[in-house]
Image (tube, helix red, strand yellow):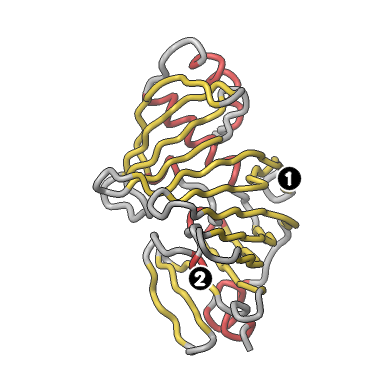
Amino acid sequence: MPLLPLLVPLYAEVAHAQPDAAQMQAMLATIDDRQQNSGDWTSLVFIEQKEQGKSDLLYEAVIYRRDVSDKLAILFTKPQQEAGKGYLRLDNNLFFYDPAVGQWERRTERERIGGTGSNRQDFDQSRLAEEYDPTWVETAPLGKYTTEHLKLTVKTGVDVAYPTVELWIDQATGNILKRQDFALSGKLMRTTFYPQWNKLFSPSKNAEVYFPKEIRIFDEVQAGTSTTIVIQQVDLNTLDDSIFTKAWLEAKSR
């Protein structure tokens, strides 16, 4: 059953009362559904890494997704010393390829993509309802917005970067405005802001697909370290099957 029609009555109701378990699960399912495409996905992204006492670094990468089969490929194109490096998600495994050594290495969900403050979840489709169980914290202001503040706990047997997540969801739009990621110890690891969301009509889905135009990630462990991701040139046309293979990524690095 389509999830998007649930959004308006759901938020109209929770504006006056604490949402129950079914309503919170519907919030997460709506977020997931909005960001998933029934076809493929290609986007050009720019990643800026800032670290205290170091020069700022700027990366360019292309993201390839096939949401129906949970496939993801990330290919770095700039700067020159990073070009050809890539990541491939296959069967719930994340692999990294470095053309300098010509080898693939399996990486964890906590892998810092390209050595930045980002990880796989920042570029992949959203799976919040599939991976987490929500509890309600409060209805709270966030700047000029009124939000539903939820705490998410990872489901048993699911592999994620962070076992506990807190979300601030805009009541008016249903979009995530703020996210905090916590380690198993309860230590806050990252705070992420989503200042602007864009949408694009998908012919294969026959509906709009939402994506954050900009993602701002602040490292809560290393003071003064932040990562900004800008998503541009989103294309929803069908991709060749070969893109989601190790051979394709290896060939692009030559």
At which x and y percent is residue 157?
27, 52
Q: Residue sitting at 36 percent across and 37 percent down?
A: 152
* Residue beneath disc 1: 200
- Residue behind mark 2: 88
Residue at image x 66%, y 67%? 60
Looking at the rendered structure, the kind of residue marked 2 is Leu
Q: Which quarter of the image is occupied by the C terminus?
A: bottom right
Q: Quadrant of the N terminus?
A: top right
Quarter residue 112 falls in = bottom left
Q: Nearer the viewer, residue 67 or 168?
A: 168
Disc 1 to disc 2, C-alpha distance: 25 Å
Which structural element holds mark 2?
strand
Q: Residues within 10 Å of mark 1 (few under 14, many from 20)?
A: few
- The location of residue 198, given as percent across then percent down, is 70, 42
Front residue of this view, candidates 61 and 153: 61
| Placement of 96 over or under 184, stated as above or below | below
Amino acid type, mark 1? Leu
Q: Position of residue 185 (x, y in %)?
A: 24, 47
Rendering coords of residue 42 (x, y %): 67, 61
Seen in the image, is 157 located left or right of residue 55?
left
| Circles 1, 2 touching at the beta carbon (< 8 Å) | no
